Image (spheres, rainbow, N blue to C red):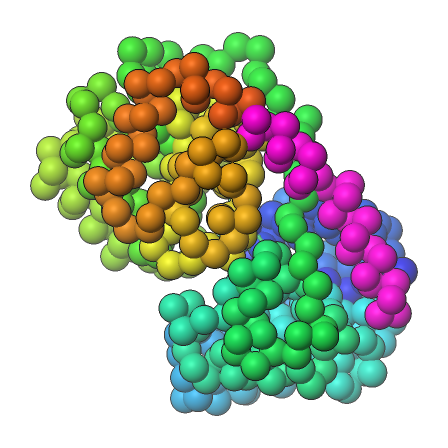
Amino acid sequence: MKIFFLDQSGELGGAELCLADIAPAFQPDCLVGLLQAGPFKTLLESQAIPVTVLARDSLAVRKDSGWLAGLSSLGQLLPLIKKAAQIASGYDVIYANTPKAMIVGALASALSRCPLVYHLHDIISLEHFSGTNRKLLVGLANRFASLVIANSLASQAAFVAAGGDPNKVSVVYNGFRPDRYAPMPENLLRHELGLQDKFVVGHFSRLSPWKGQHVLIEALTHCPTNVVALLVGDALFGEADYVALLKQQVQTLNLGDRVHFLGFRDEIPALMQTCDVVTHTSTAPEPFGRVIVEAMLCQRVAIAAAAGGATELIDHGKTGWLCPPNQPQKLAELILATYQHPEQATAMATAAKAEASATFNLAHTNQQIRSLLAQVI
Ligand code: UDP
Ligand code: GLC
């Protein structure tokens, strides 16, 4: 089975980290085509996965843009489509992993007659996409894709609600290797960060308005002063204004010694195990939410915004907490409940680890994808 994966990003977003776990299952007969160089390319190369960059400049199509931006990037698109079609003629399937890769992949599939699969990591709603891009994506998927793999029931439902063909979609959850999240023998990070006597609330996401880091910062004002936050992640897609706003918010609320910005980090399991609780605060429905499963695998209580895929990951009150989105006061109450009831929290975290290890296993995910692809080919 020869797979030509296509992804628009050079950054390490969740869709890219998901693909970095899928591609090794198809080695050596796979190639990852990127529309941009960056740390994702380096990660793939470190795993000896063949990778090529199709474009020098990134495509100008933004998720929220309309026809105009779409048309102005047509000049950039055509050579990419041609190149992708040439490569695809040597493969059994084009596997588009992101929206822009889907646009390129659909037309490359039409030219090369190579079947197309779309791994849908997004909720195609108006909160996340312009009306034009939504129609374009769904139209191309209906016309050209043999299969759409949705990362959650929520992403599947939004695709169908936007006019997507329900017969083409199957849900496959992201998979993980539980051994990567095993307890660390000695974790000195708390000491290094001077947090020995603190109750540490973690947040692991790129800094972006809809990821809602501001909700956690606001929630801290409703918690005792020994409750502190670690914000792990950086602005991956040009959200510098939001970063400035967050820093301003911290200053205005006088929380400088309680909020730690750690930037983008690779050692997620060690950092999660430094935390007492992990929060997820997306203000728009999260398509899946890898960080929630990772917290569960690290045996930590996750408090997640109750919308989208997150509601499929956590059994509220048993394997974590679901919190109404965008409600700092409620979030603070759940942080405090975890703080004040350590025995209940330990039981919940133990159940979370068992549930996540069984349900979100990488070997199973890759098996599901392999058998779906076999049907397409
Ligand atoms: N992540 C990371 N370093 C960071 C922050 C996040 O490696 O500093 C990882 C995180 O562990 C998770 C992914 O980035 O696997 C984010 O995926 P998620 O599905 O939570 O959100 P996305 O950013 O894809 O919307
Ligand atoms: C996307 C989504 C995120 C999901 C990830 C992996 O980046 O925003 O919710 O977990 O893809 O499917």
Pinpoint residue 279: horizontal percent, then vertical percent.
38, 37
- Tell me if residue 354 is in the magenta stretch: yes
Q: Which residue is drawn at the image coordinates 82% and 77% (left, top)?
A: 114
* Of 5 and 211, the residue lying toward us: 211
* Of 54 and 312, the residue lying toward us: 312
Pinpoint residue 356: horizontal percent, then vertical percent.
62, 35
The main secondary structure of the magenta stretch is helix
**Residue occupying the far front of the picture:** 317
Residue 302 visible somewhere in the drawing: no
- Indicate the quadrant where residue 80 lies: bottom right
- The answer to whether residue 158 is above or below residue 220 is below
Pinpoint residue 162: horizontal percent, then vertical percent.
52, 78
- The answer to whether residue 68 is above or below residue 192 is below
Q: Which residue is drawn at the image coordinates 22% and 19% (left, top)?
A: 226
- The answer to whether residue 145 is above or below residue 327 is below
Q: Which residue is drawn at the image coordinates 74% and 47% (left, top)?
A: 365
Quarter of the image where ligand 2 sits: bottom right
Residue 109 visible somewhere in the drawing: yes
Compared across the picture, whether 215 is left or right of 31 comes to left
Quadrant in which the N terminus is drawn? bottom right
- Tell me if residue 88 is in the magenta stretch: no
* Of 92 and 355, the residue lying toward us: 355
- The answer to whether residue 131 is above or below residue 29 is below
Q: Which residue is drawn at the image coordinates 43% and 54% (left, top)?
A: 307
Compared across the picture, whether 135 is left or right of 280 comes to right
* Of 255 and 264, the residue lying toward us: 255
Pinpoint residue 202: horizontal percent, then vertical percent.
38, 31
Quadrant in which the C terminus is drawn? bottom right
- Indicate the quadrant where residue 129 lies: bottom left
Compared across the picture, whether 119 is left or right of 300 comes to right
Q: What stretch is highlighted in magenta?
A: 351-377
